[in-house]
Amino acid sequence: MGIGSSSQNSSPVVSIKSLDDQGSVPDVKPKKKICCACPETKKLRDECIVEHGESACEKWIEAHRKCLRAEGFNV
């Protein structure tokens, strides 16, 4: 069965969940694209890097990575 085989108009979230029930999708799957996840920590990280350089911003870089991991990304 494919995603489009349902007679209902279902959202992608419903389709992903049905695939998960069949075991073909990992338990933790990101719900968003990585570029759209964790906008708060991304903004802080980026501003810090622009103003102070990457080496001075490890705290914000790690905070953003932690947030991305919580969203299901492997970073």
Image (spheres, rainbow, N blue to C red):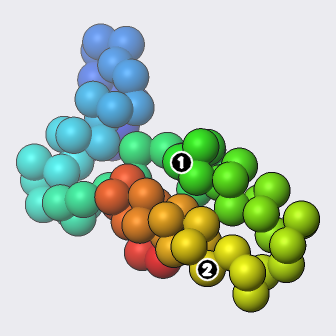
Q: Locate residue 23, reporting x and y percent.
A: 12, 60
SS at circle 2: helix
Residue 73 visible, this angle:
no
Q: Nearer the viewer, mark 2 or mark 1?
A: 2
Tag on residue 58? 2
What amino acid is found at the position of numbered circle 1 in the picture? Cys
Q: Residue placed farthest to the top in the image?
A: 8
Residue 15 versus residue 54 in the image, above or below: above
In-image side of 4 versus 44 (left or right)? left
Residue 36 versus residue 51 in the image, above or below: above
Graded by Cα atoms within 10 Å as few (under 14), some (14 to 19) or many (20 or more), the crowding at tag 2 reads: some
- Residue under the point 80% across and 56% down: 47
Q: Which residue is mark 1?
A: 38
- Residue under the point 11% across and 53% down: 22
Quadrant hosting residue 54:
bottom right
Quadrant hosting residue 60:
bottom right
Graded by Cα atoms within 10 Å as few (under 14), some (14 to 19) or many (20 or more), the crowding at tag 1 reads: some
Q: Locate residue 21, reporting x and y percent.
A: 10, 48
Q: CA distance from mark 2 to mark 1?
A: 16 Å
- Residue under the point 27% across and 29% down: 14
Residue 18 visible, this angle:
yes
In-image side of 49 versus 66 (left or right)? right
Name the image quarter holding the N terminus.
Answer: top left
Q: Locate residue 72, reporting x and y percent.
A: 35, 60
Residue 40 versus residue 26 in the image, above or below: above
What amino acid is found at the position of numbered circle 2 in the picture? Glu
